[in-house]
Amino acid sequence: MKKNIFHLSIFGFTFLSFLILFNGCKKMDSEKQLAPINEDIRKKAQRMVDENPQLQNVTYNLNIKGSGFYADVNGNKIEPGSNSYTYQCADAGDIDYYISPVLETLTRERSCSQGFRFKAKWRISVPLPLLATNPNTGALSRGRLRIKNTSGAILFQQASITPVTITDLGDDPATFNTNRLYNVEYTSSWVPFSLFTMDTAPLEHTVWAQTDCEDLPQMTLTVTSPALVSVLDPCNRIEEIGIANATYSGAVYYDNGAFLGYYQLINPCSPPSGATMPDRHEVQIKYVGTGSTDIWRDISPQNNYNNGDLLTDGYVSYPVTVSGTISVHDVYRIPKRDLFNETHGNYLVRYCNVKTGSPNCFGPWSQEFATNF
């Protein structure tokens, strides 16, 4: 009897050992299977970053009114009502209304290797036609950007920015259709990161806009935009996150999309020297599929302290300290609870930097990114 018990015990021990070994192998195999999935998500997210550098751009809605005057070919101011000048324009009616330039937006674009550059968009009301090239003189419309320090010294200047894009928007009803409205746009050259290690004075923007007139060939338009905020502050920048879309075949979704924090990227864009980094990203999504009534909504991560399992749906490895955010170190697979009515399909994504502390600060939103979750 004892012998049988002994053999049974040996059998039980052997069987138990086999189960442990089998389960251990299964676990190891499972972990090995996770690695390529993780790498696939990482590659998808990195590809999104590499192909969409505009997601780091910041657009400031300014609508700042500037000043303007008519000028001769040398840039000297001309009073249009002076008897010594005839307009000699192809379509010169009475110049009854003054020039009204407004700097609508300023977009700051970022390049990892080159620094920042600025795209200015003006809206100009004027009684004379605005042209990219003056047919009489051959002169081009051009812009100018100056960046100064707080003492007024010029730190950077691009004196002649071309090309300038001019779009005719039609009659200006505010002038009883006497003036016409134009959009004027141009983009500066790259400004090195080294310039942004200090706070600067306001940016000065100038446009020399050409007409088809002989004696009033151009207009000089100037506006000053607010001072550059220090890009050493993380809440004045956008650090990119990775976005991996869902994997699906037909209507069957078998792999959720994912968000990767800044430090999960293979080649993150380094900030300017001396910059403070954010510690989280706020992420919002909006369903834009057929019949959508969705609005921008924060994602809803939940804490998970098992740092070895980064791909658990809907959980983050670093504690959620601010609602709707993931850590710069997280990989966050998007759960159904984040989807609009748990509906897979087309979504927009936007995100911003978050620095926790007292108080918390939030950066500007990135541009919207279309993807599929």
Image (tube, rainbow, N blue to C red):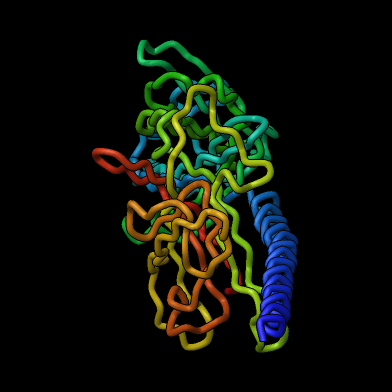
Residue 347 position, x and y percent, is 53, 72
Question: In the rendered view of the protein, which quadrant contains the C terminus?
Answer: bottom right
Q: Is residue 288 above or below residue 285?
A: below
263 sits left or right of 174 in the view:
right
Residue 320 position, x and y percent, is 37, 55
Q: Is residue 322 above or below residue 341?
A: above
Residue at the limit of the structure toward the left, as seen here: 358
Residue depicted at 71% across the width and 87% down the height:
250
Q: Is residue 118 above or below residue 281?
A: above
Question: In the rendered view of the protein, which quadrant contains the N terminus?
Answer: bottom right
Q: Is residue 320 visible?
A: yes
Residue at the limit of the structure toward the front, as seen here: 1
Could you say which is closer to the camera, residue 45 or residue 226?
Answer: 45
Q: Is residue 82 visible?
A: no
Residue 291 position, x and y percent, is 47, 88
368 sits left or right of 293 in the view:
right
373 sits left or right of 163 in the view:
left
Residue 89 position, x and y percent, is 56, 43
Could you say which is closer to the camera, residue 70 or residue 104?
Answer: 104
